[in-house]
Image: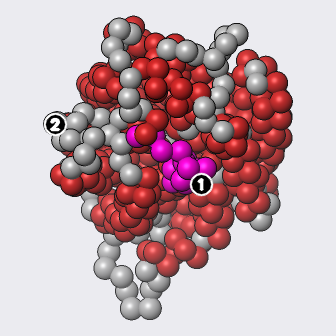
Amino acid sequence: MGTKPLRHPEKKNKNLKNKNFVPKKEAQAYAIAALGQGLVYSCMSSYITDYYMNVLYLTPMFVILLMLLARVWDAINDPMMGMIMDRKSTKWGRMKPYPVLTALPIAALTILMFVNPGFDTKNQSVWLYIFTAFVYVAWGMIYTVSDVPFWSMPNVMTPNAKERGKIISYGKTVGGIGSAVTVALPIIVGYIVADMDLEKANILKYAIMAISMAVIGMPLFTLSSFKIKERIQIPDAQKRAPGEPSTLKRIFSCKPLMLVVLSGILSFGRYMLQAAAPHVARYSGFYIGKTAPQTVDEINSNISTVALVIQVCAAVGMFGAMVFLPKLYKKFEYKHIMIVSCIGGFIASCFTLLIGWTTKNLLLCIPFMLISAIPLGVINNVSFAMVCDCLDFMEWKTGFRNNGLGSACQSFVNKIGNAFATVMIILMYMLVNIDVQNLNVGSGPEVVAAINSLAPTQNFAMFSLVTIVPGLSLLLCAVPLFFYDLVGEKKETVFSELAKLRKQRGINIES
């Protein structure tokens, strides 16, 4: 682990467990950078399925295979990035160079992801599929190169676990504003495309959204490369000694970390509250008003309104949870906060389904949708703090700390969760036989009649995408956490002893 002495040894009356290292302005810069990343990621994750299915008219099976194969590649890609970052530092830092190097490519690929450069969508040109697959996979790879280092930064900003938890919570909370912004974007852009037909309006809407989020978000993201200080100077990884366990083996042998990763994968349904909203708005049969839409303009307006109600509930519930988490951290263990919120989210989703489907009044569902969205904020924040605790545990137990690979686990969980959510949406289309291309062919009256004539079972299946499906996912998410034991006295022992062990191992901690 290195032999260099501490540059600034702590005074005897100071304890690393209680000392704060990160100035307020630095924490704010990190949070603003998270906002920039959140704007781009939320735009992609919330709308990519709707764009692929209802604008490009890609076949459901292609989208499913693209998402799953991309995630298989991520299973190699994410840990690879983590190991590269753990292995070698640079003169600019171990993690700081990557956000600024990847900002421009991510911005360009985000725009290409939502802008068709001229491929034939009606006749399903093979080049459209090749282009789509290339851009989607390339975006995921470049995003990994920035995401893994960015969310590893709190691990080296401070050795204080509580301060680290606050920085993560602050970053995730401000980053969560990106979700709120992308919820409002379709409404704002809707005024620009109000006089266009449904097909042209969707094409221009997504182009404007992608360009604006990329141009605003990525410059903000680069703040993390210039305003953050890496205080914990971990030596570069040395060649593995004979008989020494590999990095991957240490990661997979860390039981608490594997439980958090499993819990995160099982919580994939949380992404559906936002990602499925446009699909539910189109085909669930819910409408805001006294009568069903009778024109394309009315359908367009209703889609925007219903999607807005669902996504605002998701954003408010998520953001509200994030705001209160720092206070909950003082009184409750991470695992207990997660378990209670997940079970509460499941119960609320059941009520949303029951009330919504029996009354056909979406507005009555709002209180329950807000509650069912609380786990979004809790899981986003708390699971990441738990991963950092698990890295502390692994360092305490083995003498090695793999910040990059640990963050890669979280990055992989987030991406595979989004992919599973997308696959679930598309499988529902296939299961109940909703052909989006046929529903959008013909004159205005024909499109209206086709959408309004969907069977009740088809409407119910689409509504389940924002109710019982994510609810069951949250319930599954809670199960592994009952076996997570890095809490209470054990956790305190790890943190207190780790500070002493770091000093013995020559880990540099700058003030």
Image position of 412 (left or right of 346) = left
CA separation in Å, label 2 and label 1: 31 Å
The C terminus sits in image quarter:
top left
Asked whether residue 474 appears in the rendered view, the answer is: no
Task: Looking at the picture, tell me which residue is in the foreground, 277 or 335.
Answer: 277
The tag on residue 118 is 2
User: Does dot 1 land on a helix, a strand or a loop?
Assistant: helix
Image position of 300 (left or right of 347) = left
Q: Residue at x 70, y 10 (%)?
A: 290
Residue 257 drawn at (x, y percent): 60, 63
Q: Characterize the magenta stretch by its predominant secondary structure.
A: helix
With respect to residue 15, does 360 lie above or below? above
Q: Quadrant of residue 197?
A: top left
Which region is colored magenta?
423-437
Q: Residue at x 70, y 38 (%)?
A: 456
Task: Looking at the picture, tell me which residue is in the foreground, 313 or 223.
Answer: 313
Sequence-wise, the earlier of marks 2 and 1 is 2
Amino acid marked by disc 2 = Gly
Task: Looking at the picture, tell me which residue is in the foreground, 296 or 399.
Answer: 296
Is-magenta flag for residue 435?
yes
The tag on residue 431 is 1
With respect to residue 445, does 393 lie above or below? below
- Mark 2: give few (<14), some (14-19) or many (20+) Cα within 10 Å: few
Image position of 336 (left or right of 270) = right
User: Does dot 2 land on a helix, a strand or a loop?
Assistant: loop
The tag on residue 413 is none
Residue 162 drawn at (x, y percent): 63, 41
Asked whether residue 66 appears in the rendered view, the answer is: yes
Is-magenta flag for residue 235?
no
Q: Residue furthest bottom?
A: 242
